[in-house]
Image (cartoon, grey):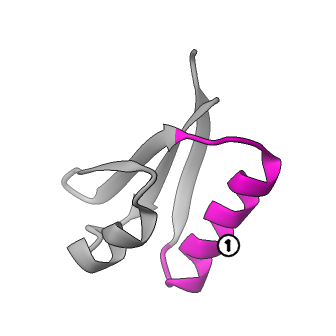
Amino acid sequence: MRYEFRVAGIVSDTLVSAFSELDSVPTAEQTLFFGPVIDDAHLHGLLSRFQALGLRVIELRRLPA
């Protein structure tokens, strides 16, 4: 499964590197992270990592296969 995470603000390169399994693209007011998510545990782990690093996920969606 592939997911997209929309995070508020422009995320620094240092914080982007904490998500090496995901690709990222900055936009005007958000940073998009996207990539494969293996299972529910991986998804919850990613969400916990965003939270632990002080990043606010404003949208999460599963991408078409």
Farthest top residue?
65
Q: Determine whether the residue tagged by mark 1 lies in a helix, strand or loop.
A: helix
Residue 41 placed where, x, y %? 80, 55
Is 52 magenta? The answer is yes
Q: Main secondary structure of the magenta part?
A: helix
Q: Which residues are magenta?
A: 36-55
Q: In the rendered view, tell whether residue 12 sits above or below residue 46.
A: below
Q: Quadrant of residue 50?
A: bottom right
Q: Which residue is depicted at the point 54% across and 62% down?
A: 57
Q: Which residue is depicted at the point 19% across and 54% down?
A: 28
Q: Which residue is mark 1?
A: 48
Residue 45 placed where, x, y %? 70, 65
Q: Nearer the viewer, residue 62 or 13?
A: 13
User: Quick check: 13 left or right of 62?
Assistant: left
Farthest right residue?
40
Q: Nearer the viewer, residue 29 or 38?
A: 38
* Neighbour tally class for label 1: few under 14, some 14-19, many 20 plus, Cα within 10 Å: few
Residue 9 placed where, x, y %? 32, 68
